Amino acid sequence: MTSAEPETRPRPTHTQRAVDSFVLELSARHPGIEVLAPTPETGPYRYDAATAKTAAPDAGTDGPAVVFPASAGEVQQVVRLAAELGVSVVPRGAGTGLSGGATATAGQVVVSTERLTAVIEVSPLDEVAVVEPGLINAELNARLAPHGLFYAPDPASFDISSIGGNIATNAGGLRCAKYGVTRESVLALDVVLADGSLVSVGHRSIKGVTGLDLTSLFVGSEGILGIVVRATVRLRPIPVARRTVTAFFDSTAAGAAGLSAITLSPVRPAAIEFFDTPSLDNIDSHSGTSLRGRGAALILIELDGYGIEAQSADLAAALTAAGGRVTVESDDDGVRLWELRRSGRGLPKDKWYIGEDIAVPKSRLPEVYAAFPALEARFGVDISAVSHAGDGNLHPLITLDRQPGDDPAQPPAALQEAATELVRVALSLGGTVTGEHGIGSIKQDWAALELSPRIRQAQHAIKSALDPHALLNPGKAI
Amino acid sequence: MTSAEPETRPRPTHTQRAVDSFVLELSARHPGIEVLAPTPETGPYRYDAATAKTAAPDAGTDGPAVVFPASAGEVQQVVRLAAELGVSVVPRGAGTGLSGGATATAGQVVVSTERLTAVIEVSPLDEVAVVEPGLINAELNARLAPHGLFYAPDPASFDISSIGGNIATNAGGLRCAKYGVTRESVLALDVVLADGSLVSVGHRSIKGVTGLDLTSLFVGSEGILGIVVRATVRLRPIPVARRTVTAFFDSTAAGAAGLSAITLSPVRPAAIEFFDTPSLDNIDSHSGTSLRGRGAALILIELDGYGIEAQSADLAAALTAAGGRVTVESDDDGVRLWELRRSGRGLPKDKWYIGEDIAVPKSRLPEVYAAFPALEARFGVDISAVSHAGDGNLHPLITLDRQPGDDPAQPPAALQEAATELVRVALSLGGTVTGEHGIGSIKQDWAALELSPRIRQAQHAIKSALDPHALLNPGKAI
């Protein structure tokens, strides 16, 4: 190469120049705010957990600018400057999202909440905690345990995902059927709007109906309406007892059909997880267990609260009548089984895969499982699914063998086609394309299958009402 | 009077003429839709339960036009015609609202949901019901009982209020601390928007995060964003047991302080109602009971679910330690006590009164009660309050003796001033001006005390985004 080498780099785009200006101005005006200029070092901020796995090899390519505000006031300063310079802003929690909601380009500014991790207050008498958005979900619960309290929303990522990210996606989890999704645990928010103003919405009480419910609107809005800088969340007393119950069945179909026995019983478990045959095979293969020796499908249940013996007895009777082989597990075995649920499955390193997040009315779960074989035959894929069965939310894993000539950055079309067809199955059963992960940047096409043009127009109108210049997380969620 | 008498009637205003045109056009284009022209007969539609009591004597004055659509399609036809003619539309359920949210003027069209009362579906397997908005809350529960299911939101008006009205106000009730407010039980809605389009939002599953959460936004929006024509609501199994527990204390202050003992216990009752001394006196006087013989303050609790004996024992221990005289009531006594809670108090016929709906963080309830004496002395009023103590929601009753010269349509200023000062007390404790009744038309000034100008601006921007011509229920909620 000659001395002209630097000239061969592509000329920066308009947005890239604007971001460079942003970094210079921010450092000049607010030198206390930590900022990373767009360099290859910030490349990882272009992805979240959904998009990183198919990321193109890009060492040496600039990422976005990244700021690390340490207070609500600093978030305001960042947003005001970005608005002034016309640079779009991507809020980011822990980057564990599964729909590309926090992905950013080289021309954008990522506002990371990594420095906003304080537990500002725990109030046992009001049963609330006031926290900053970057706080990790599990860390909050660790801080609450000495008070005998817990924060209910428990996405499987709770060890690594942030409260702010959970709020942005209205994260679900295992215990939602009993305790609700994130929205039901968020009472009040402080939010920095697109014009840099800081507003407080909601209440520290369970009730409060002063005007439109903006708190619920911000929850699940994936950062397109504002940046949450503080949240007042609802707490609950740790249950007086917990018990794990298993019911094994002879086939996926038999197990899926058995789920209705729980619904028709008076027992409402904290969590109801359903594993089909290939999911059990996967766990046994990855974790060295022998679940398949006990059956070909598993309903894994957590009971909690008062009357745990009577709950267990009523549930066991219902599931036994439905053909299940029921065991009330020991505490140790219960812990192991829930650990297997959360991290016992292996992701296929040598295969292409897509993880889905469809949900259907819970009575229709058997029909979703019954649809797998035809899709497998049609697209040459393998499909398995673990479900949060209490709320009809499935996480199908669709896999396809890698071929020698495959482009590592370009999954075969059949994989995406199978995934889309499975989404159509969910919609045909009255379901949704995403139960708890969100639309982000990668499910926009699927959202269009679910939402009418008039609803999408209404969503864009609300976005424009709060962010007329489309500054915040453009191209996400809606 | 002379033959010129008709001429002395005031000339109709522009809006009144527009409403007359609306009635004529509707009858011509859609003769199947029942409509009442604006006459004195429609006068009652100018009021709801909040505004009727101070209504001016107005026999002979025209009310609004009233339409009674019998299908979603007819609601669309009504709204489209109103939009075409520029006539504003006031959605109305059962008219039991307590904030003037359904009040209408002679120049408006009331869209009554009285003909939309169908239970379209009850699905025990999905634990949902699909209903029309005019259905009375208690009627839904009567229809669910044979299935062993119930709909949890239970505003005190449940015998007479409609599901649509409950949704419009995000109604609360007694069991909210355990089961959530109306929003937590509404999964999906069909809504007619201001342009007459019919949209479906939400999901039939507990989870679903496709785009912005418009379902939650419509809940509590008091009819300013759209008219709900169908709702999919969440059901729950009727608990296996229920039990009523009472704890009497020697003073209002002692009882209010005792509430924290429940919070610090592991028991989470379905309902926790607190009665201060004058509220017990009121019930005894009105209902011929002798509650005051048992104490000067009462915490009335409903437990439900599994382990009812253990729950009762833990709760009794906690309340006894807090100084309460605790009784686990017989089933019959329990029924009587809850009936006294709902309708045992008398409204003072010979006095002016205002009923409030403030809420505070529940640890601050004792401070609200402690503030009553100074307000009573300052404004010459009497104040008592029953509280939904589990969620910090008080219903203070502020009364003032009527004087011979009082104008029946004009309450003394001291009454409203005392009410406003009590609202300020709630706000100073981190509370809200309305826990469950809504802003409607009569609490706009109080809303301004609670919400920042920027929040109010955001609320109006959202309203404009969905209803740019301010067709739906103008002047309400925000």
Image (spheres, coloured by chain):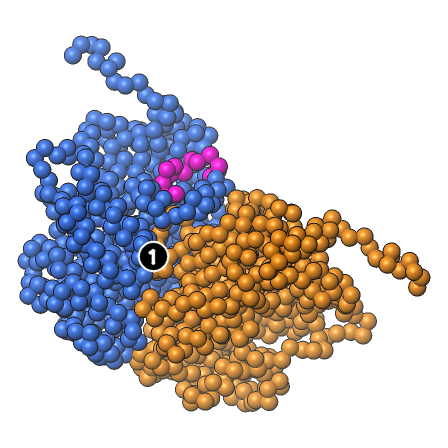
Chain colours: A blue, B orange
**Quick check: B292 left or right of A147?**
right
Q: Quadrant of residue A73?
A: top left
Report which residue position mark 1 lands on.
A430
Q: Residue at x 32, y 48 (%)?
A: A438
Location of the C terminus of chain A (image quadrant): top left
Q: Residue at x 50, y 86 (%)?
A: B336
Q: Quadrant of residue A245?
A: bottom left
Above/below status of A61 relative to B135 = above
**What amino acid is found at the position of numbered circle 1 in the picture?**
Gly
- Chain part drawn in magenta: A467-478
**Chain containing the residue with disc 1:** A
Crowdedness of circle 1 by 10 Å Cα count: few (<14), some, many (20+)? some
Measured as percent of width and height from the top left, residue B302 is found at 42, 79
Measured as percent of width and height from the top left, residue B195 is found at 55, 47
Determine the secondary structure under disc 1. Answer: loop
Above/below status of B362 relative to A462 = below
Measured as percent of width and height from the top left, residue B225 is found at 53, 52
Location of the N terminus of chain A (image quadrant): top left
Measured as percent of width and height from the top left, residue B342 is found at 54, 78
Q: Residue at x 40, y 60 (%)?
A: B187
Q: Which of these two is toward me, A417 or A209?
A: A417
Q: Residue at x 46, y 45 (%)?
A: A454
Q: Identify the main secondary structure in magenta.
A: loop
Q: Which of these two is toward me, B359 or A399?
A: A399
Q: Is residue B152 magenta?
A: no
